[in-house]
Structure formats: structure tokens, C-alpha cells
Image (spheres, rainbow, N blue to C red):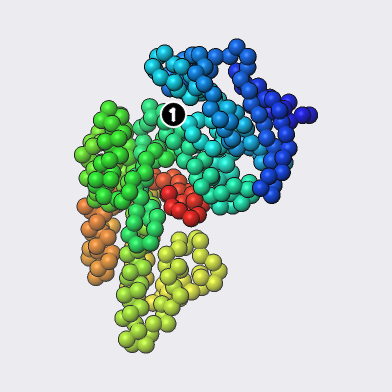
Amino acid sequence: MHVKTLLNHVCKHQSFVYQAITLTHTGGRDTIEVRIEPRKNGAPLCSICGRPGPVHDCLPPRRCNFIPLWGIAVIFIYAMRRVDCRHCGRPVVERVPWIEGKQQHTTYYALFLARWARRLSWQEVANVFSTNWHSVFSAVRWVVEYGLKHRDLSGIRSLGIDEIQYSKGHKYLTLVYQIDNGCRRLLWIGKERTEQSIAGFFSWYGIKRCRKLRFICSDMWKAYLKAIAEYAPRAMNILDRFHIVANLNRALDLVRRQEVSRLQVNGKEAVLTKTKWILLKRRKKLTRRQRSRFHELMECNLRSVRAYIMKESFQHIWCYLLPTRAGRFLDLWCRDVMRSNIEPMKKMANQLRSHRELILNYFRARRALSSGVVEGMNNKAKLTSRRHYGSEAI
């Protein structure tokens, strides 16, 4: 099969034909040069309005990269024509189907690099296909801009809002996802996790679309809660189960660290040595060695053990189906915790009391929505941010 036959099978263009195809050796590597010519009597299209017009003149031949064949670089060579467009009132460069604007890569090559960039780091993609990091970056940017321009925002009913850390220090990105069943995708990214940043999303999203939202999952960050109440008052704000459990684990770990410091004064810190993950893990996920250590801890009269029992007893709330019963359990649990003398757990109980109605929205929504899917997509976003490694950041 000839290269010309293969190109006509993969990407045939109605108003253009592939002419001379030559194999050259330039710059220390083999290159397949493909010269493209317009069909006879074919009128060029204006790149602005898309209307045909007479030829004004021709520009010098332009080279652009195509998908490599058998590891050999493929270059399209074409002399762009300028259209004497009557509608635009000035000479305009023609529209061609294999390239957009002043890019140096064909759209086929940009899609090719962007797909590989989803699997490998951008620098690895550049090394494998004999290009540079900036070419991969421009390809990914073009694909993202095309997707943003042509995406459909209708029918969105559920959103998930969360943040990720993208650099050293307290530097965050606010991410908004669509988490409807059957369609889960990233919708918007904003710098920082302030009320102004999330307000920027709602301003971009529009008042009409905000009125159609039914559910919004978020954590207890005040900036998010305030902006959701202001811009999407009709939506049910659901506090995520994942973040509540994570906060309980942080409170438990704080109790353990405080107790370790107290026991060090008496030289008894060995009681809680290497017990962090034993207390944070669920009992059914403990290893055999951890179980024996766990039983030893349960026999000790420690604040950490009491805090662990409080944390584990709270997990029963997720077994309820009705919000009234879940609310009754939450009230009793907070009452018992407030009677204890463990300040981190009491602080957590006060936090849960202040967000009681938002927590019960999880049950009012029939436990159908949570930010677990958001955390999964956050991990993908973090992985993608690592893959853009190169000489410059996005």
C-alpha cells in the first residue's frame, strides 16, 4: 500500500489532493514530506466567514507536522491561498481542514499527542515522538479549548465542589464537577478556595442554570457554604460523608498525639508507639499483627481508646435511611461526646451540631450522592498536574 493511498484512507480532504511524497533526511532524521495541492476549479473558503471567494494571491509554502508513520516524521507542505472575500471586505487566508490558525501541527497530530498525554507524562510523550514539551503542551491546550468551546451544559442537576493543593504552601485550586449519574466530568477550575473564587464559577455558570441545580456536594469550608447559599438557594447542599469521616480521623489523631506527649513525661510513651494506623483504620481492615496490638490497646484506659470508640460508633449513622432517625442518632452521639473530657472530639461534635441540617441532606437525598466520586476525580486531576512536568508550568 502506498503512503498516498494510506493518507487518502485516513484523512481524505474533498477540495485538496496529495501530490508528491518524498523521503528526505534532514536534521539527522528521516522525514516524509507530503505536498498538498488544491483541486482544479476549487474555490478557497474564507477562514473567518467560511464563504467561498476568488483567489487573491498565494503565500509561501507552509510546513506542519502530521502523525508520524513507523517512527518517521511526516510533514505536510502547502502554499496557503488568500481569499478576496467580499463579505469580510479584505483578503483573508483560506480555511484548510487539517490545521487551524497559525499552528505548526495538524489537528490530527494535536489529537494524537493529547491522547498519549493522558497516559504518559508530557516530557515522555515528547521524547517518544521526537518532539518537545511545548508541542505537547500546545496540543493539549488546543484540545482542551476545543472541548470547552463545544461542550453542552444543559441538563446538569448535581455538582461537586472541592479543592486540591497544586504547589508548596497553601496554594489551592477550586474544582467544580458534574456528578450526575451517567455523566461525571470536570466543569470549572479556579485559583484559591475563597468565596470570590467560587462566586466566579456561579457567575460564569449563569443564574438560569443555577436555578435548575438540585444537589451540590461540598465540605464544611465556610466560603463554599456561603457562596452556595447565596447563588444556588434552591439546591440541596449535601455535606460530604468522606470529609466528615476525615475530620473525625484528624480529631482522633490529635487526641493520640496529645496523649503521646503526656505519656512521654512519665516515660510510658511506648504504650501508643506505632498505633496511628491501628486507630485510624477500620477494624475489619486490620492485619493479623495489628489485631493483636489492637486488643492490647482496648484493655488500656486511654483517652485515645475512648476517642476511637466514639469515632467508630459514629459510623452507624450511615446505616440509617430516614433523616429523622439519622438526626436522632446524631444528637445522641454529640450529647455523649460533649459529656466526655476529650477536647478535640468535643470540638468535632460542636462542628457537626452547627452543620446538622446539611449533614441530614445526605439522607434526604436518599444517600444517592456523595463526594466520593469527587475525591476520585481529584486524584486524576492531581495526576494530570504532575504529568505537565517540563520547563514551564501551565
The residue shown at (54%, 24%) is 58
Query: x%, y% of residue 277?
Result: 45, 68
- Which quadrant of the structure image shows residue 68? top right
How busy is the neighbourhood of tag 1: few (under 14 within 10 Å), some, or many (20 plus)?
A: few
* Relative height, residue 158 to residue 239 (above, below): above
Query: x%, y% of residue 179?
Result: 41, 38
Query: x%, y% of residue 195?
Result: 24, 47
The residue shown at (35%, 74%) is 257
Q: Amino acid at mark 1?
A: His
Query: x%, y% of residue 168?
Result: 38, 61
* Residue positioned most to the top: 41
Relative horizontal placement of residue 374, taking residue 285 as reference (left or right): left
* Relative height, residue 26 to residue 235 (above, below): below
Q: Could you say which is closer to the camera, residue 316 or residue 202? A: 202
The residue shown at (51%, 52%) is 387
The residue shown at (35%, 50%) is 173
Q: Could you say which is closer to the camera, residue 124 or residue 61? A: 61
* Relative height, residue 386 to residue 45 (above, below): below
* Residue positioned most to the right: 1
- Which quadrant of the structure image shows residue 280? bottom left
* Residue 224 in view, yes or no: yes
Relative horizontal placement of residue 128, taking residue 305 as reference (left or right): right
For mark 1, give the secondary structure. helix
Q: How many labels, in total?
A: 1
Query: Which quadrant holds the N terminus?
Result: top right
Residue position marked by numbered label 1 in the rendering: 150
Q: Could you say which is closer to the camera, residue 78 or residue 164? A: 78
Q: Could you say which is closer to the camera, residue 68 or residue 334? A: 68
Relative horizontal placement of residue 362, taking residue 108 as reference (left or right): left
Relative horizontal placement of residue 122, taking residue 167 as reference (left or right): right
